[in-house]
Every structure is written in structure tokens, then in C-alpha cells.
Image (cartoon, grey):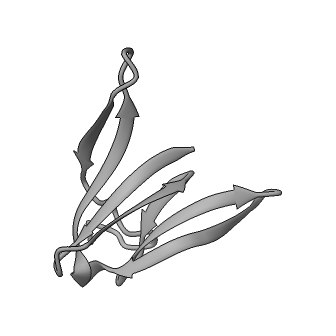
Amino acid sequence: MAYYRIRTNDGSSTSLQAQRVRTDASCLYLEENVAGVWSEVRSWPLGRVETLQRRFTENDGTWTWLTEALPAPVGVRGWN
């Protein structure tokens, strides 16, 4: 599973392990799949999320945090 770091606009950050990241119209969700069922690890209101980062392990064992764009909301179309 990947490690994600969420920085919120109040200055705090949280690092969690999750299998996927998704959004809907109002929240960012970190989720894991257990026995074929996706369950929420943690969620944040989109208005509080400042940065989403994913951790990569380099060949020498060090970590690099790369900023990722928030995924497109599920069920929301970007066209008419």
C-alpha cells in the first residue's frame, strides 16, 4: 500500500497508508480494500485540504514526497 501525506490549511499534516484516493463533491477519501470491499481509512472536507502527497522510496532507501493533484470527483462530469 502507498503512503499519503495530507496537509490541511490549518497547518497540520497527517501521513496514512491507503490503497486508493478518491474525491466526491465535498470530501477527499483515503480507502483500503478488505475482502473485496472498499472501506474508508480517513476523510477530509475538500475545503480543508491544501496538499496531497504520495511517498516514494528511492533505490537507496530514502523517501521522496511528491505532490499529486486531487483526483477528479466520482460521479461529476467535466462536460455538459
Seen in the image, is 40 located left or right of residue 74? right
Name the image quarter holding residue 59: top left
Seen in the image, is 63 located left or right of residue 36? left
In the rendered view, tell whether residue 59 sits above or below residue 16.
Answer: above
In the rendered view, tell whether residue 47 sits above or below residue 11.
Answer: below
In the rendered view, tell whether residue 65 sits above or below residue 37.
Answer: above
Residue 2: x %, y % from top left: 50, 44
Q: Which residue lies most toward the front here? A: 61
Q: Nearer the viewer, residue 61 or 46?
A: 61
Q: Which residue lies most toward the right here? A: 35
Q: Look at 35% across and 22% down and name the residue there.
A: 58
Q: Is residue 78 visible?
A: yes
Q: Nearer the viewer, residue 23 or 47?
A: 47
Task: Classify the position of the N terminus by image quarter.
Answer: top right
Residue 65: x %, y % from top left: 27, 42
Seen in the image, is 56 located left or right of residue 39? left
Seen in the image, is 38 located left or right of residue 9? right
Residue 54: x %, y % from top left: 35, 46
Q: Nearer the viewer, residue 27 or 58?
A: 58
Tag count? 0
Task: Classify the position of the C terminus by image quarter.
Answer: bottom left
Name the image quarter holding residue 23: bottom left
Q: Is residue 71 visible?
A: no
In the rendered view, tell whether residue 60 sits above or below residue 40.
Answer: above
Q: Look at 25% across and 41% down and name the residue there.
A: 66
Q: Look at 45% across and 72% down and name the residue there.
A: 75
